């Protein structure tokens, strides 16, 4: 590219024509960019100084012409590079074609060296012959990974139960280590009609104070100090492992804690057993749907309102979907509805969870159960035992709370065994 400004620019940078020709495309493109920036500064200066429009237009035209010339120059360079690459490739192919491809060829090439070796009595020569072989990553690569592996983001965590029960019960905040409530008990008498001058009807009942104490659930993990420096890893580890595993224990306690020691008084532990009542031996070909309907009726006649959820094992829910109208009528039963992926029976949503043992179920008005916690999950970081000498850090998660169903609300839940309860109502 021949231009007076361009030549002065190169001269100011101490770049000769020979040095310029020796530069690669990227280096030349960098020089063009720097040169164009100076022209832009000159144009801005003309505009700011309110130079004549003729001067401004002339500079713009010159800049456009220079850019076209730069573009052509770079294209020529790229084509020259392409030709060099093609020639190099051809030369490589010729060299490979002339290279020995077998031990026989290798020995033929070394024949003269071997003859000279035989004729000499004192000199020693080494002839190294390497036969071509299949290249393997296990034998031909050392000192690193070729190609470099691609590391996918995140962790491939072990499959784990999804927390479901904690989402459907009431939640409350505990303000003390002990929560108490007053229940009505031992009710006597009843309201009734009274004739003029007769004794009024008396109602009597006792007030009983009940209480539950907070229970503690804990879990901890140990990580190296290097892992602590990786904040994203640490956050993922805490969320995926520590808190998840802790809440799984809490959920299990809420579901079936046996009310001994540090165990919760779980919902299933307090729930009423299935009672066939007037439906005993009255249902033809009884199945799980029939059991749920009778259990729902049991809750309603106990004046505990409409059941809000059914908890069942996924395999039992699958079996429920497969139930036909009869052995001869292969239509699926109409009692089940699936809307937006949510299955329900008679309008009561069914939650699939492995929290429930296969073959069992729990149905109830879950608004009658409340989980109280003291400040949600707390996380503490520190050292214990030999952590310091091993560069380890202990991360502890702790949850304090309890499961509470008021005394007169336990009949809002019914538990049972599917096969046993179906047999109880079957004809």
Image (spheres, grey):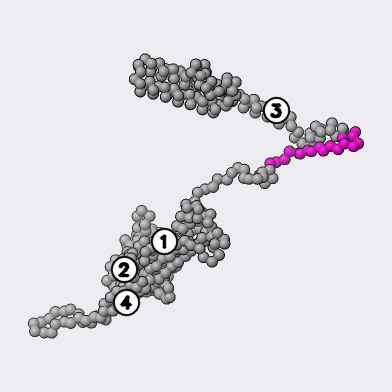
Q: Is residue 93 above or below residue 140?
A: above
The magenta stretch is: 117-137
Residue 221 is inside the magenta segment: no
Please report contact status of discs 1 and 4: CB closer than 8 Å, yes or no: no
Q: Is residue 126 magenta?
A: yes
Do residues under tags 2 and 3 come within 8 Å of each other at their CB atoms?
no
> How many angstroms separate mark 4 from mark 2 (CA)?
16 Å
**Residue 146 placement, left or right of 45:** right
Q: In the structure shown, which secondary structural element does the residue marked by tag 1 occupy?
A: loop
Q: Residue at x 39, y 23 (%)?
A: 44
Q: Which of the two discs, 2 and 3, labels the residue nearer the N terminus?
A: 3
Name the residue tied to disc 4.
210
Which residue, as the protein is rendered here, is positioned at the far left? Answer: 196
Label 1 vs label 3: CA separation?
68 Å
Image coordinates for residue 221, horizontal then vertical, percent: 50, 62
Instruction: Give the distance between the C-alpha atoms of the residues marked 1 and 4, in whole angstroms.
Output: 29 Å
Q: Secondary structure at mark 4?
A: strand
Q: Earlier in the sequence, mark 4 or mark 2?
A: 4
In the image, which disc is placed on residue 368?
Answer: 2
Q: Is residue 121 above or below residue 55?
A: below
User: Quick one: SS at disc 2?
Assistant: helix
**Marks 1 and 4, the one that precedes in the sequence:** 1
Mark 4: give few (<14), some (14-19) or many (20+) Cα within 10 Å: few
Distance, label 2 to label 3, CA atoms, is: 87 Å
């Amino acid at each position: 590219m021949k231009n007076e400004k361009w030549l002065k620019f190169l001269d100011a940078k101490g770049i000769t024509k020979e040095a310029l020709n020796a530069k690669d495309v990227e280096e030349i493109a960098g020089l063009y960019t720097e040169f164009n920036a100076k022209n832009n500064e000159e144009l801005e200066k003309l505009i700011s100084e309110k130079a004549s429009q003729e001067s401004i237009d002339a500079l713009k035209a010159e800049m456009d012409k220079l850019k076209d010339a730069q573009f052509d120059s770079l294209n020529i360079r790229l084509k020259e590079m392409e030709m060099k690459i093609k020639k190099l490739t051809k030369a490589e192919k010729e060299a490979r074609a002339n290279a020995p491809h077998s031990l026989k060829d290798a020995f033929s090439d070394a024949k003269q060296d071997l003859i000279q070796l035989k004729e000499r009595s004192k000199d020693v020569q080494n002839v190294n012959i390497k036969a071509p072989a299949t290249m393997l990553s296990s034998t031909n690569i050392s000192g690193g990974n070729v190609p470099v592996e691609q590391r996918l983001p995140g962790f491939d965590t072990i499959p784990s139960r999804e927390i479901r029960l904690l989402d459907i019960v009431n939640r409350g905040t505990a303000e003390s280590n002990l929560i108490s409530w007053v229940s009505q008990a031992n009710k006597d008498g009843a309201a009734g009609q009274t004739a003029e001058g007769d004794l009024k009807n008396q109602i009597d009942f006792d007030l009983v104070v009940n209480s539950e104490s907070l229970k503690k659930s804990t879990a901890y993990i140990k990580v190296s100090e290097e892992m602590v420096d990786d904040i994203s890893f640490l956050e993922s580890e805490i969320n995926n492992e520590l808190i998840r595993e802790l809440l799984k224990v809490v959920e299990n306690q809420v579901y079936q804690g046996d009310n001994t020691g540090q165990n919760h008084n779980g919902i299933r532990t307090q729930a009423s057993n299935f009672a066939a009542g007037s439906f005993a031996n009255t249902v033809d070909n009884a199945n799980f749907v029939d059991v749920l309907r009778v259990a729902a009726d049991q809750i309603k006649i106990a004046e505990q309102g409409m059941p809000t959820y059914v908890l069942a094992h996924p395999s039992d829910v699958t079996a429920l979907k497969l139930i036909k109208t009869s052995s001869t009528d292969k239509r699926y039963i109409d009692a089940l509805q699936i809307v937006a992926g949510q299955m329900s029976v008679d309008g009561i949503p069914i939650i699939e969870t492995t929290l429930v043992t296969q073959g069992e179920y729990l149905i109830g008005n879950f608004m009658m159960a409340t989980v109280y916690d003291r400040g949600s999950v707390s996380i503490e970081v520190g050292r214990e035992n030999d952590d310091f000498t091993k560069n380890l850090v202990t991360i502890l998660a702790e949850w304090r709370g309890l499961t509470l169903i008021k005394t007169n609300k336990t009949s809002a839940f019914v538990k049972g065994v599917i096969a046993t309860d179906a047999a109880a109502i079957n004809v």
